[in-house]
Amino acid sequence: MTTRAGSEDAAASFDPLRPKLMRVAYRMLGSVADAEDAVQEAFIRWMGADRSDVREPEAFLRRTVTRLCLDQLKSARRRRETYIGPWLPDPVLEEDEEEDVTLPLMLALERLSPLERAAFLLHDVFGVDFDEVAATIQREPAACRQLAARARTHVREARPRFQVDKQHGLKLAQAFFAATRNGDMKALGTMLAADVSIHADGGGKRPAAMKPILGLDAVMRFHERMTGWFRENGSTLVRTVFVNGLPGFVTLEADGELQTTALEIEDGRIVAIYVVRNPEKLRHLH
């Protein structure tokens, strides 16, 4: 039985590590709620562990969280097979763009096996050596190197190729919001790349395109149709901010729900627009 003093001792050593553990869990799962569950379960196990035998609490807890996430990924993948429309990770807001795992990279991670994802994130993103990776996912170090190498090949194209200046990115996000809500199609056209796409996640809970909208013409037609809707119903800008490492904004829509929009920018033009409308993915923003 855990005493009150023991619980306080466990919390005192765990709480400073909680933000780092959340980063691991969220990048493994793409869900804030699931990541919080994994981290909380790790804390429960930490309270019950013989902590006097743990030389490196951070490594021990990172290992625990990663294993819990690997277990969760099995059920998460099954849920995504029946997900209504495009799936996007929960939006996480940051004040700047210095994010190690951007939204496009998180989508690329979805195509990896759970073990490839763990090996890549632990080694390439969090700087964990392969001996610890091996102990975490219970594979030989050589096998972990192969897992990370395969993952690297799959996600290489998702790495940002163009560094976006912070102020320029947020200024472009503000201009995009204004053009799409005011119906300024001429201004909007100057911001978009020829191969621009829209990916909207409503999860079946709110209206959203069931498939990605691809190409400049299709994206322009979509926004032309939306102009009348925005004029009649409104869309209020809450703040411009980086969303999963991409410049974007949070809005309050006519139905009283929040929405996030993230813009992937290459060579000064928007190549992808990611919109999260599913209320279940936006609860943590309230």
Image (cartoon, helix red, strand yellow):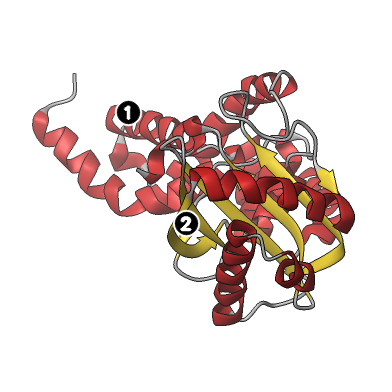
Q: Say above or below: 87 vs 93.
A: above
Q: Say above or below: 26 vs 250.
A: above
Quadrant of image for the C terminus: top left
- Identify which residue, 66 or 241, lies in the foreground: 241
Give the amino acid at mark 2: Leu
Q: Say above or below: 98 vs 108.
A: below
Q: SS class of the residue under badge 1? A: helix
Label 1, label 2: how many angstroms apart (C-alpha)? 28 Å
Look at discs 1 and 2 and give the one toward the viewer: 2
Marked residue nearer the N-terminal end (1 or 2): 1
Q: Residue at x 65, y 20 (%)?
A: 79
Q: Is residue 24 left or right of residue 207?
A: left
**Label 1 crowding class (10 Å Cα cut-off): few <14, some 14-19, many 20+?**
some
Query: Residue 14 appears at what percent x and percent y?
Result: 30, 45
Query: Residue 179 appears at what percent x and percent y?
Result: 63, 65
Q: Is residue 239 left or right of residue 155?
A: left
Q: Residue at x 62, y 23 (%)?
A: 204
Give the residue pinned by disc 1. 44
- Identify which residue, 134 or 269, lies in the foreground: 269
Q: Residue at x 81, y 50 (%)?
A: 221
| Tag of residue 99 | none
Give the amino acid at mark 1: Ile
**Label 2 crowding class (10 Å Cα cut-off): few <14, some 14-19, many 20+?**
many
Q: Residue at x 74, y 64 (%)?
A: 185
Q: SS class of the residue under badge 2? A: strand
Quadrant of image for the N terminus: top left
Query: Residue 66 appears at what percent x and percent y?
Result: 55, 38
Q: Is residue 64 visible?
A: no
Query: Residue 210 appears at what percent x and percent y?
Result: 75, 31
Give the residue pinned by disc 2. 93
Q: Is residue 148 left or right of residue 262?
A: right
